[in-house]
Image: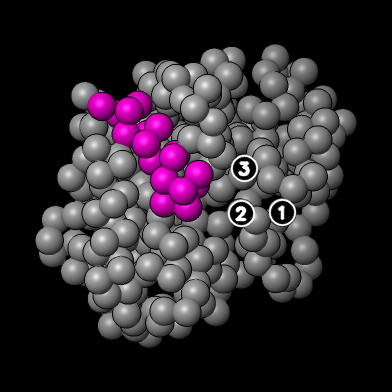
Amino acid sequence: MNAKTVQFPNGIEVPAIGQGTWFMGEKESAFRSEVNALRQGIDLGMTLIDTAEMYADGGAERVVGEAISGRRDEVFLVSKVYPQNAGGTKAINACEQSLQRLKTDILDLYLLHWRGPIGLDETVRAMESLQKTGKIRHWGVSNLDTEDMAQLWQVPGGENCVTNQVLYHAASRGIEYDLLPWSREHQMPLMAYCPLAQAGNLRQEVLHHPVMQQLARARGVSSAQIALAWVTRSDNVIAIPKAVQPTHVEENAAALTLRLNPDEIALIEQAFPAPAEKTRLDIV
């Protein structure tokens, strides 16, 4: 069975499951195992790697830089800029520092990590400047809700945003009320961080839920694979789970070819109902 992919508005196709790096780079003793995990993921088809200048104060970018050394052309590389750095010369400097840590001369995608004190118009101008100088190929945002996206679309050049990275998993479905439909309407895929409910106290609740366990047993897979297959059930959501253990990397990659049927999806959505009204965007 073919691996699931997602297409950006510019026609670039990426795997529907990539690799996240939040909490990587925090311990020198884990550096080699984290590098090896990312390389294993690339080997298995998870060629989109997401990181940020915030993660371990650049430590995660250093891990990624080592992992993709000699393999840069195989990878779709994503990093994120702090809100306070997302404009003017600060944005230029922040991007250049990320590139140095990543040991590359260009990012495939650069995201505003969350909305902060710098105006969206200034951030868009900074992103366009970085594109013109060849430091980034595309840009997007993260943790922006529907109202924020509508405001971005009113900014000159704002409609060139190619993605919005948000929290999304079975126990956090608030984006389905309006943000996900808005994104579909504008033909813009979303990136789902913490797709296995890694942050907060929901991982056990999701992966150990009887329905997830039941479906996993019936399919002969793990509940994590079921959870990833659910997040990537449509053609416009990219999941970026983080994994360091080789078995977890293998499981995540195998979920690229796992497709749930309508009955399985219905069971999960009955167990984890979507909100019936607008809810505040979940952020961790």
Which numbered disc flags the more N-terminal residue, 1 or 2? 2
Q: Residue furthest front?
A: 28
- Residue 96 in which image quadrant: bottom left
| C-alpha separation, residue under disc 2 versus residue under disc 3 | 7 Å
Measuring 55% from the left and 79% from the top, which residue is drawn there?
147
- How many marks are shown on the rendered structure? 3
Relative to 173, does residue 63 appear above or below in the rendering? above
Q: Does the magenta portion include 61?
A: yes
Q: Toward the viewer: 282 or 10?
A: 282
Helix, strand or loop under label 3: loop
Which span of residues is magenta-colored?
53-69
User: Of 73 and 129, which appears nearest the observer?
Assistant: 129
Gap between marks 3 and 1 measured at Cα: 9 Å
Task: Name the amino acid, label 1.
Answer: Ser
Relative horizontal placement of residue 123, taking residue 113 as reference (left or right): left
| Circle nearer the N terminus (3, 1) | 1
Using residue 193 as the reference point, say whether residue 263 is left or right of it.
right
Residue bearing mark 3: 195
Residue 55 locus on image (x, y percent): 49, 47
Above-or-below relation of 244 to 55 = above
* Residue shown at 43% from the left, 71% from the top: 84
- State which tag comes first along the sequence, 2 or 3: 2
Density class for disc 1 (Cα within 10 Å; few <14, some 14-19, many ≥20) is some
Horizontally, residue 241 falls left or right of residue 93, namely right
Q: Would you name the residue on which mark 1 appears?
A: 172
**Mark-to-mark CA distance, 1 and 2:** 7 Å
In this rendered view, identify the residue nearer to me: 87 or 243. 87
